[in-house]
């Protein structure tokens, strides 16, 4: 650890090299994207240990050529857990291919049950529950005059909704949500050794809950996403699951849950943040709530929750005039494409009146987000609740907002609101 490292929010070590420079880039990646877009060809960024792809047209090209740009490294951790934490993880499940890192035929096999389980009809069916939970979460603080929105709302609604659509026991949802946050910290943030071990214990506890859910759905299938995943691995009526199939199912479920709730939590935070940083736009939204869907897409474009994912070349390729050998790592910046002036007019302006669409906040092509409808609906319900019930909402003046240093769930640490 460097002499200047200190413990910051969430027990994370701040200032430890090489993470210090990466932290800086992650807290505000936009100047880096702008430089990369202005340079000839691609720019290699040491902090990311990858070629940065930040122009809209180049990002689209990569996403449309999955046979040349593999997803195998999409979730490469920023931090390797310590041997003690790895020993704890050894008592859990998972470590098998997941949809986001799979290519070709395997990718299609893993993706098919997810798309079925997140169909428009399944999303429609979960909306009354999502609306009821959104209202109940606001009920809990509406009389208080102030709230820390991330803890009271943004970290809660997506987990509850994911729990319902996946088919988790509601009593297990808090531990599963917590385990998801801990998995992200363990793999993407530098933690003290003891904290790593504690995080690994939480992850393993979550994995055992997911394993129990999968085994229950094998004997008692229902209309939920967990049952779809189980049926895709274990045909109905078959024995099992074997230990290998249990690992596969937990890996599948864990990936799906993390992809679903951490991202939506992040977008809830940044959407409310940017609307309140632009009070005229918040007032417009309160006066004309029919603008809410466009506002959600503008927030997703302007400060994308998932800033980017990695790809690796499968053969020598030329991209944007840069020759890349086989095995070259790329960071495909959806967040950079979404600020590209060649694609979006005044890209650095947050403007809910612009025509929505054309952004890449939910990706594109074979790996494009299968949960975007569910995410957008949760954002819509939330803004409907807040504009109707708390039109006087504003950012609390005493608490400057700090962004979490991450490229995969970009959001404020805390968001203190008042009214
Ligand atoms: C604001 C919320 C969300 C954002 C910004 C987001 C963004 C994305 C993006 C950019 C990708 C493409 C990754 C790539 O190309 O490598 C993706 C993939 C994925 N998303 Fe989402 N997502 C969100 C919500 C959700 C939800 C609610 C679910 C599930 C219910 C979900 C499940 C997935 C899955 C399973 C994949 C991988 C698909 C594949 O590899 O074929 N996402 N998401």
Image (cartoon, rainbow, N blue to C red):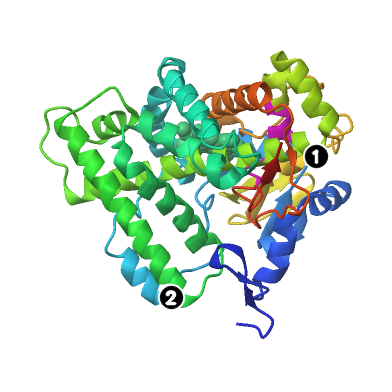
Please tell me in which quadrant of the rendered image residue 61 appears.
Answer: top right
| Horizontal side, residue 59 vs residue 170: left or right | right
Q: Which residue is the site of mark 1?
A: 277
Compared to residue 16, the image places residue 107 above or below, namely above
Q: Which residue is the site of mark 2?
A: 194
Please tell me in which quadrant of the rendered image residue 274 appears.
Answer: top right
Q: Which residues are magenta?
A: 296-307
Number of residues whose C-alpha sits closer than 10 Å to that of mark 2, classed few (under 14), some (14–19) or many (20 or more): few
Q: Is residue 334 magenta?
A: no
Residue at the front extreme of this rendering: 143
Compared to residue 320, the image places residue 93 above or below, namely below
Look at the image and tell me in which quarter the N terminus lies: bottom right
Compared to residue 256, the image places residue 405 above or below, namely below
In the rendered image, residue 59, in percent from the top left (x then y), is placed at: 70, 39
Q: Residue at x 65, y 69 (%)?
A: 19
Q: Report the front residue among 88 and 273.
A: 273
Q: Residue at x 30, y 28 (%)?
A: 228
Which numbered disc flags the more N-terminal residue, 1 or 2? 2
Residue 334 showing in the rendered view: no
| Horizontal side, residue 132 vs residue 335: left or right | left
Q: Secondary structure at mark 1?
A: helix
Compared to residue 376, the image places residue 411 above or below, namely below
Number of residues whose C-alpha sits closer than 10 Å to that of mark 1, classed few (under 14), some (14–19) or many (20 or more): some
Look at the image and tell me in which quarter the C terminus lies: top right
Q: Report the front residue among 158 and 106.
A: 158
In the rendered image, residue 385, in percent from the top left (x then y), is placed at: 60, 24
Q: Residue at x 31, y 56 (%)?
A: 205
Q: Report the front residue among 46 and 191.
A: 191
């Amino acid at each position: 650890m460097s002499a200047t490292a200190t413990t910051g929010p969430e027990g994370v070590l701040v200032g430890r090299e090489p993470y210090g420079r990466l932290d800086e880039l992650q807290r505000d990646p936009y100047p880096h994207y702008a430089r990369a877009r202005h340079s000839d060809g691609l720019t290699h960024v040491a902090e990311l240990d990858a070629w940065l792809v930040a122009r809209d047209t180049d990002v689209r090209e990569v996403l449309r050529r999955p046979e040349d740009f593999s997803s195998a490294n999409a979730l490469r951790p920023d931090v390797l857990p310590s041997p003690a934490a790895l020993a704890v993880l050894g008592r859990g499940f998972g470590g098998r291919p997941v949809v986001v890192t799979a290519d070709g035929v395997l990718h299609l096999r893993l993706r098919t049950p997810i798309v079925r389980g997140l169909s428009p009809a399944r999303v429609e069916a979960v909306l009354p529950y999502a609306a009821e939970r959104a209202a109940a979460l606001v009920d809990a603080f509406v009389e208080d005059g102030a709230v820390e929105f991330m803890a009271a709302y943004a970290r809660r609604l997506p987990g509850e909704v994911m729990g319902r659509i996946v088919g988790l026991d509601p009593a297990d949802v808090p531990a599963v949500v917590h385990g998801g946050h801990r998995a992200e910290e363990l793999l993407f943030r530098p933690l003290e050794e003891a904290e790593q071990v504690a995080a690994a214990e939480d992850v393993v506890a979550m994995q055992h809950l997911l394993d129990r859910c999968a085994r229950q759905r094998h004997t008692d299938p229902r209309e939920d996403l967990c049952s779809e995943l189980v049926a895709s691995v274990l045909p109905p009526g078959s024995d099992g699951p074997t230990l290998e199939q249990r690992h596969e199912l937990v890996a599948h479920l864990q990936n799906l849950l993390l992809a679903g709730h951490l991202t939506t939590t992040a977008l809830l935070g940044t959407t409310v943040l940017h609307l309140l940083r632009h009070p005229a736009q918040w007032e417009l939204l309160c006066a004309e709530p029919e603008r809410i869907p466009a506002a959600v897409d503008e927030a997703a474009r302007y400060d994308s929750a998932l800033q980017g994912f990695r790809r690796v070349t499968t053969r020598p390729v030329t991209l944007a005039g840069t020759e890349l050998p086989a095995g070259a790592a790329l960071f495909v910046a959806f967040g950079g494409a979404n600020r590209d002036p060649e694609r979006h007019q005044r890209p650095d302006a947050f403007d809910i009146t612009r025509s929505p669409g054309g952004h890449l906040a939910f990706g594109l092509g074979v790996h494009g987000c299968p949960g975007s409808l569910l995410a957008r609906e949760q954002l819509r319900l939330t803004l409907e609740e807040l504009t109707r019930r708390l039109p006087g909402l504003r950012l609390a003046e005493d608490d400057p907002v700090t962004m979490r240093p991450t490229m995969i769930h970009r959001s404020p640490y805390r968001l203190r609101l008042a009214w």
